[in-house]
Amino acid sequence: MFQLSIIKDTLSVHPSNFGVPPDEALIAEINKKYANRVLHDLGLCVCLFDLVQAGEGKVRYGDGFLWYKVVFRMVVFRPFTSEVIIAKVKSSDEDGIRLTIGFFDDMHIPAAYLPQPSAFDPNERAHFWLPSPPSPPSSPSHTTSAPSLLDSLVSSRMYIDQGEILRVRVEADQFCDDEPGPQKFVEGVGAEAKGRVRAPYNVVCSIAEQGLGPVAWWTGETEDTGDVDAEGDAMEEG
Amino acid sequence: MEVVNPRVALLSNLEVLTLLRELESDHLTRTKLAQRIKKEEEASGTVHGSSTLANINAHLEATENLRTIEVEAIGYLSADYLPTSSQSAEGVTKLVKDLAPYELTKAEKLQVVNLAPTLAVELYVIVEELEDRLGDRMEEILTHVRSSTATAAASASQSIGMGSVDDVVHIEEDSWQHNSGEDADGIIDEDMFDDTGEGAGVEGDLDVDDDD
């Protein structure tokens, strides 16, 4: 989940900080510049781990800052592909589930990576999984499509609610570097900025596998399914 | 800016949590000190006098970004659905040693440490082709994991509350103080500044943890 990266940079220290030891001033500068920032193709920087090397401070023409060449190690959040992570459901929509792990929110599970068969319930605003799929419909052309799933018994559905703790597998990650660039003009009028700004770092996760999904499904598995079955029977009888 | 090496080593959740908690306590002592100095100055009436120390602290004060990620990451890592807060450095070291004979890959060991699986289902997700590779030795791994968190919990309760965490932080602090001392001396002498010995040592330790 976390890794150490070695980064080299040239940083300046403001004259008002000349009073403190230079290493402390540099650590403050590094954290100011890098903490909570996504570096392209590297990951989300958390904080400085330690300084590896620092040159002598030099004054440049034009300002009173001391410029240091520094090599340091950074704690970076970059889960590797196929790593298993515990995350919380932030929200659900037709396209999939958005996840959060507190300090990082750009994680999502596309609908294709949900356990099959599953569907989105617009009333509950949540996805659900049918552990015991209904008997295959007579027409072989469309097998368990969303509408037929929505006709299933509510009691046999396993909902993935908001705030639930999921065990997910990282499938892929993607970096987007959306530079603002020059403003585009369409027919003499400045074009509107794109409605949705892409997140600089996205992680795609999956729960379509045994053992993945809500943690509660697997810890109390036997009791849970038992309860569900009992409820289902009650519903059918009633 | 230049990325020299994107992945020198992998860090376990516990290592990151320990580092962040240390930052947090640093921050707290710093703000407390600044407040105390301010109060003393106000009491003695020399507000514009010798407030340099407070000023310096203000400049070095962690920025909003660092505070945000620090608080949020501590919140996630010490959540009760992650085992990290019940782990200790000794427990993890022992666990990694115990895992050595099972021929797990580095990534698998890291995940076993991070997620501390106590059920066979959880282990299935982490280790590929579990049954072929481990057969019935699966239960042994789960026992090792349980014992590693159990000893940590026991030692924590013995030393009342935050005891075990303090110990970990203390170990880290020692190396850091050593580090900063060396750097302070090294202002004049550039050669002193590259603490290859120190850095290499820490790195080596990490590698050993991962490899064992």
Image (cartoon, grey):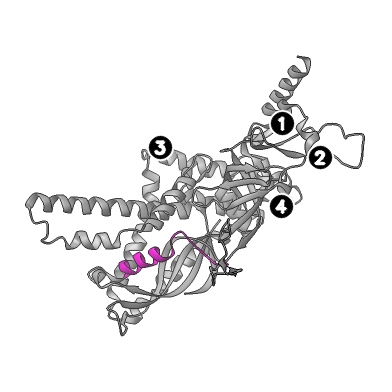
Point out the frontmost of discs 4 and 2: 2
Tell us which disc is closer to us: 1 or 2. 2
Based on the displayed image, in which of its 4 quarters is residue B101 positioned? bottom right
Q: Which mark is residue A145?
A: 2
Q: Are marks 4 and 3 on the same chain?
A: yes
Three-letter amino acid code at the position of disc 3: Ser
Q: Are marks 1 and 2 on the same chain?
A: yes
Q: Which residue of the protein is positioned furthest toward the bottom in this rendering?
A: A61
Residue at the disc numbered 1: A157
Q: Nearer the viewer, residue B161 or A169?
A: A169
Highlighted range, magenta: A23-41
**Mark 3 residue element:** helix
Q: Chain of mark 1?
A: A
The residue pinned by badge 4 equals B128
Q: CA distance from mark 4 to mark 1?
A: 29 Å
Residues packed near mark 1 inside 10 Å, few (<14), some (14 to 19) or many (20 plus):
many
A143 on left or right of B149: right
